Amino acid sequence: MRSIRRPLLRLSLASAALLAGGAADVAAFAPAGPQAAPRSPPAPFSPKASVPIDFASRERCRLWTASALDTTPVGSPPVVPEEEEDDAVGKRERLRRKVRSLLRRDGDADANSASRGSNRRMLRQNAFAIVAGLCLSFNAGFVNGACMSGLLHSSAARVSVAGFTGAYTQAGLALATGDAATFSFFARMIASFVGGSAISGLLNPKPVPGRMGPTYGPTFLVGSLLLAASSVLAFRSAPGLAVFHLAAAANGLQNGMSSMYTANLVRSCHMTGTSTDIGMLLGQILGGNRENAWKLLTLAGLASSFTLGGASSYLAVTKFRSLALAFNALFFLAIGAASVAFTAIEEHVTLWQAGSGQWEQESDGPTHPDGPNEK
């Protein structure tokens, strides 16, 4: 009530002062006449006689009236000047930015840590792929040397089961000369190599370069079975040339595997593309571009391993004859077992899951049916 009574009192005082001032003005300008009695100017109105009120002008009265009409409640918060309000808003905004910066910094740190872990994992898998590629190249050179030695089979046939540029040429010559038997043999050889590559693609329909998929281990085991079957046929001197067809299928499978995983960097069975890449990279290095020098070292290692495998096959086939491919099948099996063990360690699955391919791999990491990452 006090907050309402004070403005009303001020308003009544201002109204009285205005009325008094208006009456004085009228008396000053009124016409003089005989009937007009002289009147003295009224005294200013005041609720307290001891405190006279003197107004200098109507402007001052108007300002006082405007101040009397200010009805701001007594208990309301004080009005903050615009400068202070802007300063407070600026402080809050700076605090928000600082908090966002800290949160972003923590998120970036987590992302960087995850990225470093992913990079280390990729480096381990790439290093394993290169080592496995060198072993597969040695294996392909061994198989090819044994089949081309003429000492593996009772037919004394000399057949290449790794590179097939010559097979296409031989098939074309046989077709031109009307040699149906030769054409059929080389056509089957080409189909065997293509069929082995098709098996690798069937078992790995969506390969991701640089990442071990669930069916990589089983694919290597299938290749070792093909070489084991070829070794058995060679040992028993089975009629026909199926021993060469199975060896070609095994090489096609391993060449498809290495090509898919390394994005065609490692092609373990034929050296035509490898030799082309070696020459191309060597020319780039001589021209001043050394960015791909590591690829040159990898390709040179593949070529050396293939050559060493051919030399080892001659020593094995001259001493063990048809049993030479048995060593080759065991070596291929060892590569497959190493691949299974590496997959089990990297993906945190059991050896059975890695060997049978019974685990799943998602884009953000593998999900294992029975493992710790089960969702």
Image: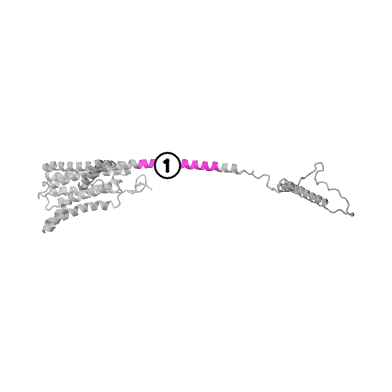
Could you tell me residue 18's position as x and y percent? Answer: 77, 50
**Residue positioned 51% across, 43% down in the render:** 96
Could you tell whether 66 is left or right of 175 in the image? right
- So how many labels did they put on this image? 1
**Residue positioned 53% across, 43% down in the render:** 93
Q: Is residue 4 visible?
A: no
Q: Which residue is mark 1?
A: 108
Could you tell whether 299 is left or right of 41 in the image? left
Could you tell me residue 276's position as x and y percent? Answer: 22, 46
Tell me the SS state at disc 1.
helix
Amino acid on which the number 1 mark rests in the picture: Asp
Image: 37 above or below 48: below
Q: Main secondary structure of the magenta part?
A: helix
Judging depth in this view, the residue of 243 and 277 nearest the camera is 277
Judging depth in this view, the residue of 179 and 226 nearest the camera is 179
Q: Is 95 in the magenta?
A: yes
Could you tell me residue 219's position as x and y percent? Answer: 25, 49
Could you tell me residue 261's position as x and y percent? Answer: 28, 47
Locate residue 323: give its quadrant.
top left
Q: Is 363 in the magenta?
A: no
Q: Which residues are magenta?
A: 90-118
Q: From this viewpoint, which residue is outermost toward the right?
A: 34
Locate residue 186: give its quadrant.
bottom left
Q: Is residue 232 visible?
A: yes
**Residue positioned 18% across, 44% down in the render:** 141
Could you tell whether 365 is left or right of 246 in the image? right
